Amino acid sequence: AESSGHEMNWQLLGILADVVAAVAVVISLLYLAWQVRQASKQNASASHYQQTEATSTVFDSLHQDQELLRIYNQGNRDPSKLKKAEVARYTMLLGNIFARYNNYYVQRENGTINEETWNITINYISTLAKQPGLHMAWPLISSNFYSGLQEVVDEILSNNKLVKTDNDASKST
């Protein structure tokens, strides 16, 4: 009878050890999930910071270089009034801007930026698409970017076709 009591204690101890091990596994999994979530938040924050820095670099260059700002503004409004070298600078500047948008596109495809950030990017592209300059420059630079971004921009441009108004026609005569 005494040996069955010891056997019962060992069985109970074994069951208790299994329960403790199971609880430890669950706690470890919860901790791991928390760490993954924290790392994901940190990555999203770092990505947002990089996007902000990249955008601000373009704006800083426009702010610091009045000639580049003039070329950018003229290129947006009427690129036909730019000299050949200015068209090249304008096109390179748009290429630089769209390189950032290309990065945002890839990050969106990889799920590392949220839809709100992507929608802000679409708003920037849509604003540029209302200007003649992007319509002129996009065919020159589009092949440098992912086909998915090309499709997005092509669609935005097709929805923002530029039509000469009567005022535009009277200015050219």
Image (cartoon, rainbow, N blue to C red):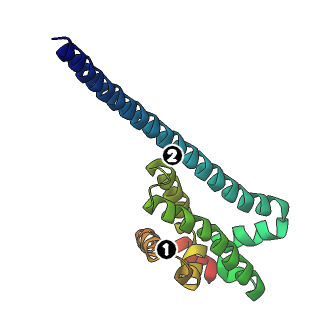
Amino acid residing under circle 2:
Ser
Q: Would you say residue 136 is visible in this rendering?
A: no
Q: Which residue shows up at 83% across the image and 70% down it?
A: 67
Q: Which residue is mark 1?
A: 162
Callout 2 secondary element: helix
Instruction: Locate the N terminus by quadrant.
Output: top left
Q: CA distance from mark 2 to mark 1?
A: 42 Å
Amino acid residing under circle 1:
Leu
Q: Which residue shows up at 50% across the image and 72% down it?
A: 165
- Which label is found at residue 40? 2
- Number of numbered discs on residues: 2
Viewer-nearest residue: 7 or 134: 7
Estimate the x, y position of residue 122 in percent, counting from the top left. Answer: 49, 59
Foreground label between 2 and 1? 2
Q: Would you say residue 88 is visible in this rendering?
A: yes
Q: Quadrant of residue 90?
A: bottom right
Identify whether 63 is placed above or below 73.
above
